Amino acid sequence: MKIKPLADRVVIKKLEAEETTKSGILLTGSAKERPQEAEVVAVGPGAIVDGKRIAMEVKVSDKVLYSKYAGTEVKVDGEEYTILKQDDILAIVE
Amino acid sequence: MKIKPLADRVVIKKLEAEETTKSGILLTGSAKERPQEAEVVAVGPGAIVDGKRIAMEVKVSDKVLYSKYAGTEVKVDGEEYTILKQDDILAIVE
Amino acid sequence: MKIKPLADRVVIKKLEAEETTKSGILLTGSAKERPQEAEVVAVGPGAIVDGKRIAMEVKVSDKVLYSKYAGTEVKVDGEEYTILKQDDILAIVE
Amino acid sequence: MKIKPLADRVVIKKLEAEETTKSGILLTGSAKERPQEAEVVAVGPGAIVDGKRIAMEVKVSDKVLYSKYAGTEVKVDGEEYTILKQDDILAIVE
Amino acid sequence: MKIKPLADRVVIKKLEAEETTKSGILLTGSAKERPQEAEVVAVGPGAIVDGKRIAMEVKVSDKVLYSKYAGTEVKVDGEEYTILKQDDILAIVE
Amino acid sequence: MKIKPLADRVVIKKLEAEETTKSGILLTGSAKERPQEAEVVAVGPGAIVDGKRIAMEVKVSDKVLYSKYAGTEVKVDGEEYTILKQDDILAIVE
Amino acid sequence: MKIKPLADRVVIKKLEAEETTKSGILLTGSAKERPQEAEVVAVGPGAIVDGKRIAMEVKVSDKVLYSKYAGTEVKVDGEEYTILKQDDILAIVE
């Protein structure tokens, strides 16, 4: 089973706290917007603006920081994912 | 009797909970926006932007995830449907 | 006496509850937005966007579903009508 | 003395209740937006969008329905008028 | 000393109540937006939209009606003026 | 040390009350928006709209009126400045 | 480990108070928006507008003033950073 996000949406899977610690990143932030680290598992085809499709900037397997409260959580085949707009992704971590 | 949605609207029919379980998808989410699985039963011709019609990305019989509180519910010939904008559809499930 | 709506406005006449029942459509919905069935009696020339007039998608005598609280009600020659923007029409029913 | 409205504004003069009755139109509506019948007495040159002036759709002496609370009332030479944007006019009555 | 308004701003000087009476205009209106009669004393060069400057529609010495609460009052050399955007001017009075 | 404002921002330095009096300008206004006289000390390169940079309309040493509550105050080398967008400047005083 | 901000986002590192004092800048401001001095450590590729990527105006190692409450704080390898949009940067300090 696959989730194919529409337009400029992205499906991400949160990285476990352990994994977060291993990568050396600890995330803090205001209560209003706490960033999270996650891995991209599916990428939409891009939004269409003025009749042209805008290429996406993230790709599958990118590690990303995103606003914790952005997007919608879904559970597929027992795994939890988040579907959010690419614009809610703050940065790629390498 | 047929419902033909206008512009970029889509008519969907919620999948029964049983069906949801069979497909292996369990949906969770914040109280604010709980996604739902549904099947597309009718698709509008697409919105017109700058004089050009934008092709729709979903098609009839697609299984989709959408925001639970999006759209308007109608009952036609005893069946319940939801009419919503394509932008309220999060992803196609295959 | 005729009502000629401006731009992308449409004049509709609500179908009676009896008529609604005959056509086999029962409408339900959230308290926030209850759809209604109506017949289109007049159609504006279309909005002008970027100097081009956008053709309307509904035509006189179409049966339509619309958001109950959209538009403005007027009474002409003893008949009640609603004037609303085409974008408040959800779908055409055939 | 003349009032020349700017851009897409229109000057209208409310039709008296008697006159409204003679024309056979009785207006009802929600408390939020009660339409009114009026006659157009002056029309602006049209708004400028993307460097092009958009032609107005109403003309002097048109009878129009408009949202009661739209616009600004002025009194000129003892007569009361309302200045409003053309987009607040719902329809022309013939 | 001169005030040169920027972009699509206009400097106006309110006409005295006496003068208002002489011209035969009495202004009424809702508490929310009471129009005022004033004379234009300076006009900005016009806003720039899509790289093109939009010509202004009012000129110095025009008598105008404007929304009372629009703009900012300044006192220069003992005289009171109001600086407002042209779009807050409702009409030119001739 | 220099402050180089970005895009369409401007750095201004308030004129002292004494100086304001000498120039013959006394500023009044609503509590909501009290204009201030200041001198421009740095000008950004201009905003980019549709890929084109829009030339700025104010230049260094212009005396300007601006909305008192606009912008952000900073202290550099013991001097206080305000950084604001050019659109918050009402007029140039000559 | 590197943070690569998306679109028109910038990663900055706050300058210590000591450093702020050494550079001779003391920052004041309204409670609503207190500017901060920081150093740019990473710059996104720029936003895409109308299909064209807009070049960024700040570059790595620029000293900048920004609105204190803008952006999201993250901690990477024990260091705290802020990710914000370039438009929340007020000025470059030289």
Image (cartoon, coloured by chain):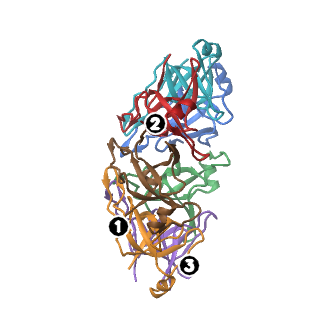
Chain colours: A red, B cyan, C blue, D green, E purple, F orange, G brown
Kind of residue at badge 3: Thr
Tell me the chain of label 1.
Answer: F
Residue drawn at point x = 59 percent, y = 19 percent = A78
Q: CA distance from mark 1 to mark 2?
A: 36 Å
Which residue lies under the disc numbered 1?
F57
Front residue of A12 and C49: A12
Q: Residue furthest bottom?
A: F22
Q: CA distance from mark 3 to mark 2?
A: 61 Å
Q: Quadrant of the C terminus of chain F?
A: bottom left
Q: Residue furthest top?
A: B22
Which residue lies under the disc numbered 2?
A86
Residue drawn at point x = 62 percent, y = 45 percent = A31
Kind of residue at badge 1: Glu
Q: Is residue B12 above or below residue E66?
A: above
Residue drawn at point x = 55 percent, y = 24 percent = B65
Residue A64 x/y as whole percent:
47, 35
Kind of residue at badge 2: Gln
Q: Quadrant of the N terminus of chain F?
A: bottom left
Which residue lies under the disc numbered 3?
E21
Residue F86 x/y as whole percent:
41, 64
Mark 2 secondary-structure assignment: helix
